């Protein structure tokens, strides 16, 4: 009997050690507590974490990107209404509203069942698990990859290609992927890539394997939307919008004009982000 008790004690100790080595169970997703979620990993296991406080930016806050706004809003509306819609790649100049536009669309359509899941580039290999987790949910999900770019050989590149259009399984109809990037083709491009172009006897030019590989990911996004640097008048109009948002008068806007131009010059950019930062700084100092 003593030997049996010793055996059971040792077995319990062994099981306790094994349990300590196993990753913890994924927490239940609080679907009703938020409209946005982040994909997190803990001890090798991924799970969705609710984001209780999200950006309140509205589509009306985004100035001088009317064409881009119309394209993204229309695609998102089709998706929310259960109509055919495309995965979207937003590329171009920094600070021009790419990420803000996606957040504004979430705010515009959240009452119609739209939800957002933010996924870091390093976690893109979990895209299959994320889609499986939400495939049977009644909501419509945008998987959001912000500031996306890859270096040669990164694993997330292949995972994203498969998720977009490379798996034997059909893409779930309640999931779209929206990604932002400063690179049109998401990969670095070098002068040496041009050497892979092939010239045929009849004068046609065909891209080589290197070029084909670099454009193969971006072309799997059905909708490409490009953003461009703002002109000076556009930048000042955005400054005026945000200053009024912070409660400043028309006189304040006019008085701040010179400072706004210097602020942009010092940062080397006339972007929406720079305009928002200046307006926030100027308004805060004026209230002090």
Image (cartoon, rainbow, N blue to C red):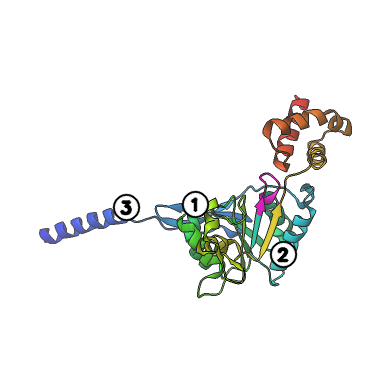
Up/down of 274 relative to 120, above or below:
above
Could you tell whether 124 is left or right of 74 in the image?
Answer: left
Residue 56 percent location from the top left of the image = 71, 47
Crowd around label 1: few <14 · some 14–19 · many ≥20 (10 Å): few
Quarter of the image containing the N terminus? bottom left
* The magenta segment: 91-99
In magenta stretch: residue 94: yes
What label does residue 217 carry, if any?
none
Residue 253 percent location from the top left of the image = 84, 33
Q: 89 or 28: which is nearer to us?
A: 89
Residue 61 percent location from the top left of the image = 77, 47
In magenta stretch: residue 134: no
Disc 2 to disc 1: CB gap under 8 Å: no
Which residue is denoted by mark 3 in the rendering?
Answer: 20
Q: Earlier in the sequence, mark 2 or mark 1?
A: 2
Could you tell whether 218 is left or right of 65 in the image?
Answer: left
Up/down of 262 relative to 186, above or below:
above
Which residue corresponds to the image point at 62% horizontal and 55% vertical from the top-left? 184
Residue 27 seen in the current view: no
Q: Nearer the viewer's eye, disc 2 or disc 3?
A: 2
Crowd around label 3: few <14 · some 14–19 · many ≥20 (10 Å): few
Could you tell whether 140 is left or right of 210 in the image?
Answer: right
Q: Secondary structure at mark 2?
A: helix
Based on the displayed image, in which of its 4 quarters is residue 11 positioned?
bottom left
Crowd around label 2: few <14 · some 14–19 · many ≥20 (10 Å): some
Which residue is denoted by mark 2 in the rendering?
Answer: 75
Which residue corresponds to the image point at 68% horizontal and 68% vertical from the top-left? 85
Q: Residue furthest top?
A: 288
Which residue is denoted by mark 1 in the rendering?
Answer: 151
| Total numbered badges shown on the rendered structure | 3
Up/down of 81 relative to 249, above or below:
below
């Amino acid at each position: 009997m003593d030997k049996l008790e010793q055996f059971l004690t040792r077995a319990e100790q062994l099981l306790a050690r094994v349990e300590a080595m196993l990753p913890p169970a994924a927490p239940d997703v609080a679907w009703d507590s938020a409209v946005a979620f982040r994909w997190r990993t803990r001890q090798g296991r991924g799970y969705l974490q609710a984001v209780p406080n999200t950006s309140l930016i509205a589509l009306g806050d985004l100035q001088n990107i009317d064409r881009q706004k119309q394209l993204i809003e229309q695609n998102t509306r089709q998706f929310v209404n259960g109509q055919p819609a495309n995965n979207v790649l937003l590329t171009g100049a920094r600070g021009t509203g790419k990420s803000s536009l996606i957040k504004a669309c979430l705010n515009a359509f959240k009452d119609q069942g739209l939800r957002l899941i933010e996924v870091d580039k390093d976690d893109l290999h979990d895209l299959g698990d994320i889609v499986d987790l939400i495939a049977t949910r009644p909501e419509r999900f945008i998987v959001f990859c912000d500031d996306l770019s890859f270096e040669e050989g990164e694993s997330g590149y292949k995972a994203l290609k498969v998720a977009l259009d490379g798996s034997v399984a059909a893409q779930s109809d309640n999931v779209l992927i929206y990604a932002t990037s400063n690179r049109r083709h998401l990969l670095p491009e070098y002068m040496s890539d041009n050497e892979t172009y092939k010239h045929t006897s009849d004068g046609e030019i065909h891209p080589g394997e290197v070029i084909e590989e670099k454009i193969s990911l971006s072309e799997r996004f059905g909708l490409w939307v490009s953003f461009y640097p703002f002109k000076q008048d556009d930048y000042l109009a955005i400054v005026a919008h945000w200053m009024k948002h912070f409660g400043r008068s028309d006189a304040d806007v006019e008085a701040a004009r010179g400072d706004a131009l210097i602020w942009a010059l010092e940062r080397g950019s006339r972007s929406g982000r720079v305009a928002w930062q200046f307006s926030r700084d100027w308004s805060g100092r004026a209230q002090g």
